[in-house]
Amino acid sequence: MRSQILSYFALTGLLLAGWIPARAQERDWPRAHRIVERAQEDLRRIEHREGWATGDRGHFNAAERNLADIRRDLDRNRLDRPRLEAAIEEIEHITHVDRIDGRARERLNEDVRELRRLRDEWHWR
């Protein structure tokens, strides 16, 4: 009898341990949407305002494309880590472009920090 009770508690514990990360990840979806949406908006603000060298424009286009793909994936309740890392790298490159004003650079740096935090805190499977 005692072993059955212990088995029941062990099984319950295992089920709860598997359920908690899944529930925690579900709560991250709205936050992930907000972070990606804000990064897209900040990129759009500098798209036409700044002069772009050809190479820098390529990084800008890649960042926009990666964020759009991430957003589509989020709509399907998926998050692709390599694509997220690529978006972070592209936006980080853009923050080093000389023609971007200080406020825009700081907003993009904040976006990079938030995207990294999302990547680091996400429950990857």
Image (cartoon, helix red, strand yellow):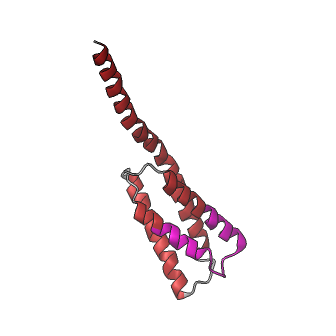
Please tell me which residue is depicted at 40% across the width and 56% down the height of the picture: 79
Predominant SS of the magenta segment = helix
Measured as percent of width and height from the top left, residue 67 is found at: 47, 64
Residue range (magenta)? 86-111
Image height check: is 99 above or below 69? below
- Residue 71 x/y as whole percent: 44, 58
Above or below: residue 38 compared with residue 48: above
At 58% from the left and 84% from the top, the residue drawn is 52
Res 68 seen here: no
Question: In the figure, is residue 110 to the left or right of 28?
Answer: right
Q: Quadrant of residue 7?
A: top left
Outermost residue, bottom side: 54
Residue 19 versus residue 31: which sits nearer the camera? 19
In the rendered image, residue 34, in percent from the top left (x then y), is placed at 53, 53
Any magenta on residue 90?
A: yes
The magenta stretch spans residue 91: yes
Q: Is residue 49 above or below residue 71?
A: below
Frontmost residue, 37 versus 81: 81
Look at the picture and state if 112 lies above or below 49: above
Residue at left offset 36%, top offset 37%? 18
Residue in the picture at 66% in, 77% down? 100
Q: Quadrant of the N terminus?
A: top left
* Res 79 visible: yes
- Name the outermost residue toward the top: 1
Q: Position of residue 109 (x, y in %)?
A: 63, 66
